[in-house]
Image (cartoon, rainbow, N blue to C red):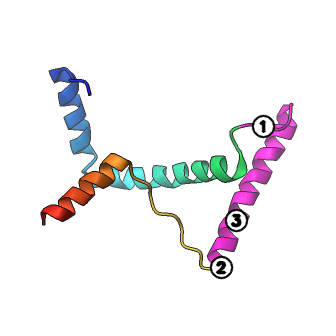
């Protein structure tokens, strides 16, 4: 662990307070959906690397990957497979557990 300077700590506290506002929550809801799609593409469809050389082939791969993501979501919806819950760090889960135990 490291100690932050006072100015760094104050900036961090202001950012945490801003995250509690309704405006931030609405803005982040859009972002989290997009990040979930990118995460699914990377984990399930190997989006990190392109198989082809050239702009046209790369573009085609991106379109086909997007179609595959959409199809996999449609199939999951038809099969009533629930979407994954948001992950949390081990530390955050430990904090939640200690709050439950304190009650």
Split into 4 quadrants, where in the image is the N terminus?
Answer: top left
- The residue that disc 3 covers is 72
Left or right of 5, for residue 94:
right
Q: Label 1's element?
A: loop
Find the magenta span and give its range: 49-78
Magenta segment includes 70: yes
Measure the alpha-carbon separation of dots 1 and 3: 20 Å
User: Which label was assigned to residue 79?
Assistant: 2
Measure the alpha-carbon separation of dots 3 and 2: 11 Å
Left or right of 47, for residue 8:
left
- How packed is label 2: few (under 14 Cα within 10 Å), some, or many (20 or more)? few
In front here: 43 or 94? 94
Residue at image position (19%, 28%) is: 9
Q: Quadrant of residue 8?
A: top left
Residue at image position (18%, 63%) is: 101
Of the two numbered discs 2 and 1 on the same chain, state the one appearing first in sequence.
Answer: 1
Q: Label 2's element?
A: loop
From where the camera sits, is residue 56 visible?
yes
- How packed is label 3: few (under 14 Cα within 10 Å), some, or many (20 or more)? few
- The residue that disc 1 covers is 50
Where's residue 37, x and y in %?
59, 53
Residue at image position (62%, 75%) is: 77
Main structural element of the magenta stretch: helix, strand or loop? helix
Of the two numbered discs 3 and 2 on the same chain, state the one appearing first in sequence.
Answer: 3
Q: Are marks 3 and 2 in contact (CB under 8 Å)?
A: no
Where's residue 79, x and y in %?
65, 79
Q: Is residue 20 above or below residue 1?
A: below
Where's residue 99, x and y in %?
19, 59
Left or right of 100, for residue 39:
right
- How packed is label 1: few (under 14 Cα within 10 Å), some, or many (20 or more)? few
């Amino acid at each position: 662990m490291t100690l932050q300077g006072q100015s760094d700590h104050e900036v961090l506290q202001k950012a945490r307070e801003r995250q509690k506002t309704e405006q931030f929550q609405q803005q982040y809801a859009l972002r989290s959906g997009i990040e979930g799609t990118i995460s699914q593409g990377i984990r399930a469809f190997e989006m990190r690397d392109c198989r082809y050389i050239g702009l046209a082939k790369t573009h085609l791969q991106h379109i086909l990957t997007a179609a595959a993501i959409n199809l996999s979501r449609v199939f999951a919806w038809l099969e009533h497979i629930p979407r994954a819950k948001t992950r949390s760090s081990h530390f955050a889960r430990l904090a939640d557990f200690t709050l439950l135990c304190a009650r």
